[in-house]
Amino acid sequence: MDISLVIQCLGYDRPRYLQAMSESCQSGADIEAYIRSLPAQDPFQGVAMKRYHDMSTIPSRMERGGMGWLPWSDVAWAQPIPPNCDPPMGVFFKGNTGLLTQTMIGIVGTRKPSLLARDRVAETVALCTGQVSLSGGALGVDALVHDESLTAGTPTIAVLASGLDEMTPKTNLRLFHRIVDSGLGCIITEYPPGVVPKPYFFPQRNRLIAALSNRLIVVEAAKRSGAVLTANLAAQYGIDVGAFMGGYNAAQSVGCYGLIHDGAFAIATTELLCEFLGVLVPQVVDPTEDTADNTAVDPVLAIISAEPVSMDRLATALQWPMGQVIERVTVLSLQGKVLVLSGQRVVRC
């Protein structure tokens, strides 16, 4: 059995011990000697010995689950992995590992995204030409990233906080299967088969997302959230961080504004998003509009911003009958220029 795999299975949740074993152990005998050399009062001694004796079940678990093992040193990562991230010995994987050598754009956010989040994720994914989207496989923005990537034909990688035979959340199992079966995706984890997620695994998972990203974008995030933690870690690793501007006083935007205040790149327009991603701004012609009138400014669009506004306020501002406002907003909604929210509120896309 690969010595890097053995060490990872023993110390996946103990970075200090994992590092020590990686530096001093070259064989199974070395590992067993290392474990026995630990002080009797060290709680890791008993844990490590049990894991070492259970190692014989790992190959069969991996075979049954269709998993592979990829030593960290065997991957030509798109950028040098920061040593201060305490990298694992390698990753367990399912899917297309060729994606791990390509430029990765980390896209993360809240588990309770707003209605605008899908549009922002879809636009970001569409602009990631020749790059791979990277996220955490969780509910909310993470799931949107993987789903929109598969729909758009953009490669995607999910980094999980559990063994690949214990993938969570269970509601995303169909999505995980799509990622693997599509040929356009890969699922990786540093946790051995049989390991169920624990609360402190998620910050560990987040530091791996940050370390693997060539750039990291936060779509939406609360003030204290895993997305903000991931962004802060990325900044510590010297990785560029961008954050979308959000709604005024919106709970999902507080974390993004905090990151921007601390120096993250503020993404407020498609042009700025392209600048952050290092791609050209797409030139789009709306086929539903008369080209002779392209210079005309729609009176409704002229007063709708990225902040939700009620149709009552629109009618008052335009001095139009409510029926005329509803008719025009409906047309703009069908053209994908505005989004109608609950409570008869409208926001510009």
Image (cartoon, rainbow, N blue to C red):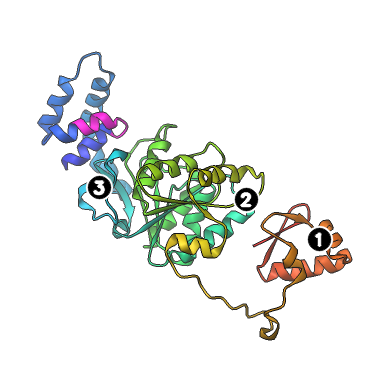
The amino acid type of the residue labelled 1 equals Leu
Quadrant the C terminus occupies = bottom right
**Disc number for residue 289:** none
Q: Rounded to the nearest whole Å, what is the CA distance between mark 2 and mark 3?
A: 37 Å
Residue 180, magenta (yes or no): no
**x and y percent of residue 99 in the render?**
32, 59
The residue that disc 3 covers is 69
Residue at figure coordinates x 28%, y 47% from the top left: 81
Which picture quadrant has residue 268?
bottom right
Q: Secondary structure at mark 3?
A: strand
Q: Earlier in the sequence, mark 1 or mark 2?
A: 2
Residue at figure coordinates x 53%, y 44% from the top left: 261
Left or right, 268 with reference to 105 = right
Q: For the residue carrying disc 2, how many other residues have a C-alpha within 10 Å: few (<14), some (14-19), or many (20+)? A: some
Residue 17, magenta (yes or no): yes
267 up-or-down from 48: above or below = below
Q: Secondary structure at mark 2?
A: loop
Answer yes or no: is residue 160 visible. no
Q: Earlier in the sequence, mark 1 or mark 3?
A: 3
The stretch in magenta equals: 12-20
Q: Rounded to the nearest whole Å, what is the CA distance between mark 1 and mark 2?
A: 22 Å
Quadrant the N terminus occupies = top left
Nearer to me, 69 or 271:
271
Q: Mark 2 against mark 3, which lies toward the viewer? A: 2
**x and y percent of residue 326 in the render?**
81, 65
**x and y percent of residue 305 in the render?**
69, 59
**Disc number for residue 114:** 2
The residue that disc 1 covers is 314
Residue at figure coordinates x 38%, y 37% from the top left: 204
The amino acid type of the residue labelled 2 equals Ser
Left or right, 24 with reference to 248 = left
